[in-house]
Image (cartoon, rainbow, N blue to C red):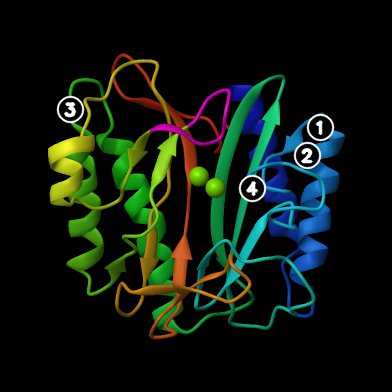
Amino acid sequence: MRAAGRVVHQTLAACRRHVCPGVTTAQLDQIALETFTALGAVGLFKNYPTYEPGKGFSGNTCISVNDEVVHGIPGSRLLRAGDAVSIDCGIRLDGWCGDSALTMIVGEGTPDIVRLVRIAEETLELAIRLIRPGIRWSDVARKMQEYVESRGLSCVREFVGHGIGRRMHEEPKVPNFVSSEFLNRDDFYLEPGMTLAVEPMVILGGPEVVVLDDGWTVVTRDHTAAAHVEHTLAVTSDGCEVLTDGR
Ligand code: MG
Ligand code: MG
């Protein structure tokens, strides 16, 4: 999974280098496809969830701009200066999966957008610092939620992180907030060897999201901007090792 994680990191790094005003999200998607294919990996988003040719998700990555939270479909949209663009990439290499997302600003963003992206990144960093064996996931998720909400931003509640391994989406559910449902039914203790995709989704305005008529793109109901960042990581004997950060 380290090797798979490195491919995801290199793919997102290649996309990052090409983000600029005037590039289309389809062009970034093509760069991602070429990068991970050259590294011997297979994409996990194209034709998701059944992987039948021509069915399911049409992109090789998810690219979500501004009020799009996750699952944006790459296409003819031109990026403009000030946009917040999230790129999410999942691949399989030699039977093992990696999944990571970044959000970056095209050129210079408004102070609100800069702060949104910074807080989303800090929320993921907070989780990475907290993760160690013997604590419950809800202890981490509560701190992530508090970090976001105490700064006047919102956590998306409809989508959560996940276990990852041979398949991209495995048990357990890894939310970035706590709910009575999670505490009563799905909470778990962190153990060495667990591999998780942790992916905070943060909104500048309210937490409500809707899915567009394309069946995929998740947007904020109030059309304020959102940021999504994700790493695949492994719980170790005394903390965690991030597998998709290029180290
Ligand atoms: Mg992802
Ligand atoms: Mg994921």
Percent of width and height locating residue 239: 31, 24
Q: Does residue 139 show up? A: no
Task: Estimate the x, y position of residue 159 in percent, counting from the top left.
Answer: 40, 55
Residue drawn at x 81%, y 32% is: 39
Q: In screen coordinates, is 79 left or right of 175?
A: right
What crowding class fits label 4: few (fewer than 14 Cα within 10 Å), some (14-19), or many (20 or more)? many
Above or below residue 9? Residue 225 is: below
Q: Secondary structure at mark 3?
A: loop
Q: Is mark 4 within 8 Å of ligand 1?
A: yes
Element type where label 4 sits in the image: strand
Magenta region includes residue 166: yes
**Distance Cα–Cα, label 1 vs label 2:** 5 Å
Q: Which residue is mark 1?
A: 39
Residue receiving disc 4:
89
Q: Which residues are magenta?
A: 164-171
What secondary structure prevails in the magenta region?
A: loop
Q: Residue at x 48, y 41 (%)?
A: 231
Please name which of the two marks, 4 or 1, marks the residue nearer to the observer: 4
Q: Are marks 1 and 2 in contact (CB under 8 Å)?
A: yes
Dot placed on the residue nearer the N-terminal end, 1 or 3? 1
Disc 1: residue Cβ within 8 A of ligand 1's nearest atom:
no
Q: Marks 3/2: CA distance?
A: 35 Å
Asked whether the beta carbons under mark 3 and mark 2 sit within 8 Å of each other, the answer is: no
CA neighbours of label 2 inside 10 A, class few (<14), some (14 to 19), many (20+): many
The answer to whether 105 appears left or right of 157 in the picture is right
Residue at 77% across, 32% down: 41
Under mark 1, the amino acid is Leu
| Label 3 sits on residue | 135
Helix or strand or loop: what does disc 1 sit on? loop
Give the CA distance from mark 2 to mark 4: 10 Å
